Amino acid sequence: MDPTLFLTQILVPALWQGLIVTVELVALTAPFGLLLGIGIALGRQYGGKGLSSACAGYIIFFKGCPLILLLFMLYFGLPSIGITLPAFTAAVLGFILCNAAYNSEYIRGAILSIKDGQITAAQALGMTRWQTIESIVLPQAIRRAVPGLSNEFIYLIKYSSLAYMITVIELSGEAKIVATKYFMYSEAFLAVGIVYLALVTLTTYAVHLLEKKTAIPGMSQ
Amino acid sequence: MNIFQILIEWGPYLLGGAAITLGLVASALAIGFIFGLPLALGQVYGSAPIRAIIAAYVWFFRGLPILVLLFLFYFGIFPVIGIDLPAFFVGALVLGMRGAAYQSQIFRGAIQSIPQGQMTAALSLGMTPWMAIKSIILPQSLRLSLPGWSNEYPEILTDSAVCYAIGVVELLTRTSQVVSQTYMTMPVYMAAAVMFILLNYAGMWLIQRVEQKIAIPGFGIKAV
């Protein structure tokens, strides 16, 4: 087959389709992964004994269990106990659960870096516990966690490729299909590699801008 | 059959898979170390073209998902250049080459954290640059890099499961085989998850022991 034709007629349209699915996966995961991550970090840090150890258990499980195994559980395992999820939903759910576990560790680290005196001062001003967390601790902690969180976001772009293993045809899935059909393995995977590199490089750049934007002058990291 | 019977019957098979996973991870870590350290040295002490090549290598391997890297090398590059390796070795090599990219950055940070004056002092004592690197810089920076390096282990452990996709018969592959034999889906997956988590903890415990063992009193091992 003519290489130009292969590229313009087959490879690029396929990768474009895949790119849309990958972006959907990432865009649906990131906000919920962040929210759940904040929740788990708060539960771990400020929750009672039960909640705190439940959150610790969550982190141990979802950080220790390989994501691909987690996706298998959600997609192939859950139907055996009567819950059947569409592949795309299972993938997003798995990504959220995993993403939140890592995010919570960054946020908790940032919470620990806020000086105790600030909490005492807030209490001395008559703030409730929740007010202190919400308006004193979290706004600073989340800013400090931005480098870690953005790193995790870049990881998310890369591990979204695992959705292919439970039949969600995203970027790497499209590449695999084209590669197998036309027997163009190196070409297809190098092309999809370039797309991932572009995604990751652009995101890294965007994240740098975000980090500068969210930085507070004088509040050193 | 209940889950206990299945675990008694298939447990040894799964444990064998865990051993293969451990072998895969150990090989990948070793390959990553062997290539990562020279990459770090090249990036600190090398000439401009060498530094640019290494930076490109790191950019490439850190920017691609492990699944795409495995597909690219297993189905694409290795067959094209005539390397015909069993899936296990391809998995270990790809995990290792990517690990080298990550490890090189850990070592680079540690090397650069040694004050420049030490290098100058070593040179003024008549040491060659290589002697200074070998006996002054590396013994310190390798110790300093251990906390960062220990993060490599859980990452490679969880990523090693992706080698399932190119047909490496490791823990996840064996788990899937047991699932299709017994139809006990969830319990078998959970058993595998527990094994992965235990492997994670066992490895981290071992690394911590090494860290304590090689610590020099007064020379603080701190995160780089």
Image (cartoon, coloured by chain):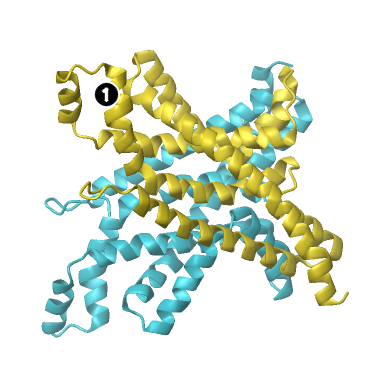
Q: Secondary structure at mark 1?
A: helix
Q: Residue at x 23, y 69 (%)?
A: B137
Q: Which residue occupies the foreground of this view, B186 or A16?
A: A16
Q: Is residue A139 above or below residue A55?
A: below
Q: Which chain is yellow?
A: A
Q: Is residue B123 above or below residue A87?
A: below
Q: Residue at x 80, y 60 (%)?
A: A178
Q: Residue at x 43, y 27 (%)?
A: A40
For residue A99, side relative to residue A192 (left or right): left
Q: Can you name the residue that lies furthest to the right here?
A: A1
**For mark 1, does the 10 Å Cα neighbourhood hold few (<14), some (14 to 19), or many (20 or more) residues?**
some
Three-letter residue code for mark 1: Thr
Where does the N terminus of chain B fall, quadrant-wise?
Answer: top right
Q: Report the label total.
A: 1
Q: Is residue A137 visible?
A: yes
For residue B7, side relative to residue B22 (left or right): right
In this figure, which residue is indicated by the disc labeled 1?
A132
Q: Which chain is cyan?
A: B
